[in-house]
Image (cartoon, rainbow, N blue to C red):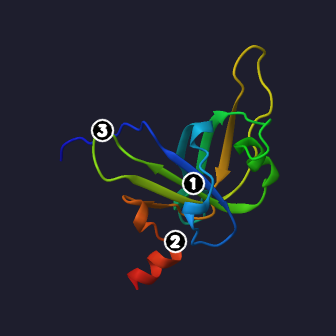
Amino acid sequence: MPATIMTITKATVKFALGATEPVDWSTEEDFSCQVQTASVDATDNVQDVDATWCQGPTQTVAEPSFTVNLTGLQDWTQANGLSMFLFTNRTLEGWVQLIMPNTDVAPTAVAVCHVRFTPGSFGGAAGTPLTFTAALPCQGTPDFTQNATTVLAESERESAAA
């Protein structure tokens, strides 16, 4: 299989409030111009099991956890900006949609994550553009698709597989 190299030059980053999907993403604010990096990162979940009288220590593997990691430009002076959205909605459940069209190959990569919102940074070094980092923990497994029109909620995927 030949290498696939993705180069992202224009991504879409949207947020929606609420614990349930589906979300009408066409009505949600696009914060792409404030975001510098966006990624969905997995953290391995290996748990140690102590030794018993019959066997030595072992490990069990569980589902990984996922986090939407963002860096961007602070925009605290904008009432409807991303910084205030994350701060105002801290601890609330919602959804993040990342659409990353590739300049070199089709199709478009899409990730949708059920998250708990956390605010980003406030302030920073003198004389430099103020940036933030935010880590939004995913509630369950993200949905990854190759086309924005085929994003399914996890429950819809399970129903389709049954």
Q: Which residue is mark 2?
A: 153
Task: State whether residue 18 is above or below residue 79.
Answer: below
Q: Amino acid at mark 3?
A: Ile
- Which one is nearer the viewer's eye here, 159 or 8? 8
Residue under circle 1?
A: 66
Q: CA distance from mark 3 to mark 2?
A: 27 Å
Indicate the amino acid at tag 2.
Ala
Depth check, front residue: 162 or 61 = 162
Residue 51 picture location, percent across and down = 60, 59
Disc 3 element: loop
- Vertical relation: 55 (above or below) 161: above
Whole-Å distance between the Cαs marked 3 and 1?
23 Å
Q: Mark 2 or mark 1: which comes first in sequence?
A: 1
Which quadrant does the C terminus fall into?
Answer: bottom left
The disc labelled 1 sits on which kind of residue?
Phe
Which residue is rendered at x = 39% and y = 47% of the image?
101
From the viewer's side, name the closer residue of 70 and 41.
70
Residue mark closest to the camera, 2 vs 1: 2
User: In the rendered image, which residue does mark 3 sit on?
Assistant: 5
Indicate which disc, 3 or 2, sits on the residue closer to the N terminus: 3
